């Protein structure tokens, strides 16, 4: 088994939760298509359908970014911290979807929250990668690596 495997279980669970979330959003589009009688490939029609369709598309557009940051932060920084950020991100995206389907303005708060969480995951990923490349392999790095980098050996 790979040495990174024990550090990736939470990330794998987060990835599966993201897949379920994305599937739920896609099903909502299918239900809205049936409800408002809008056949693919049409994306215009009833305003509620358009909001559901747009919310699903917006969430799907961000999932590759989220998943790559989740994995890098989980493997190189700490899987527990990355997984917690992932759960919060998925919760924010679910709130975004629900808010957007009700009214376009309902998406803004959760949108900003999910963006902040992506930036946090990016910071964790960068910190983990820096620690991986800059610290000696025998030195523990979480949470002492920032002090080592600053010269407090």
Image (tube, rainbow, N blue to C red):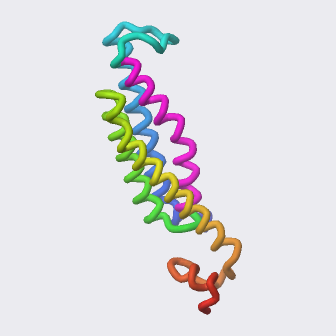
Q: Position of residue 117 (x, y in %)?
A: 45, 54
Please give left or right for residue 94 compared with residue 59 in the image. Answer: left
Q: Nearer the viewer, residue 47 or 66?
A: 47
- Please provide percent x and percent y for residue 139: 62, 84
Task: Residue at the far left: name it.
Answer: 102
Relative height, residue 37 to residue 6 (above, below): above
Q: Using the image as rendered, state which of residue 106 and residue 137 is in the foreground.
A: 106
The image quadrant that residue 30 belongs to is top left
In the image, residue 79 above or below residue 98:
below
Residue at 67% x, 79% y is: 135
Q: Is residue 28 left or right of residue 68?
A: left
Give me the residue at 40% from left, 59% from top.
84
- Between 40 and 55, the residue placed more toward the observer is 55
- Magenta residues, as a range? 49-74
Relative horizontal placement of residue 41, taking residue 112 as reference (left or right) = right
Decide if residue 5 is in sight here: no
Task: Look at the image and say whether residue 57 sits in the magenta stretch.
Answer: yes
User: Could you tell me what secondary structure mostly forms the magenta stretch?
Assistant: helix
């Amino acid at each position: 088994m790979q040495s990174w495997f024990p550090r990736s279980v939470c990330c794998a669970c987060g990835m599966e939760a993201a897949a379920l979330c994305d599937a739920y959003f896609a099903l909502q589009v299918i239900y809205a298509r049936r409800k408002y009688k809008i056949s693919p490939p049409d994306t215009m029609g009833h305003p509620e359908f358009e909001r559901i369709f747009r919310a699903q598309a917006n969430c799907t557009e961000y999932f590759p970014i989220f998943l790559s940051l989740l994995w890098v932060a989980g493997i190189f920084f700490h899987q527990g911290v990355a997984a917690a950020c992932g759960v919060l991100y998925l919760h924010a995206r679910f709130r975004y979807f629900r808010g957007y389907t009700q009214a376009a303005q309902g998406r803004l708060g959760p949108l900003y929250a999910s963006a902040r969480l992506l930036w946090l995951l990016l910071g964790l990923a960068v910190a983990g990668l820096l620690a991986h490349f800059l610290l000696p392999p025998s030195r523990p790095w979480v949470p002492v690596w920032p002090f080592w980098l600053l010269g407090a050996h």
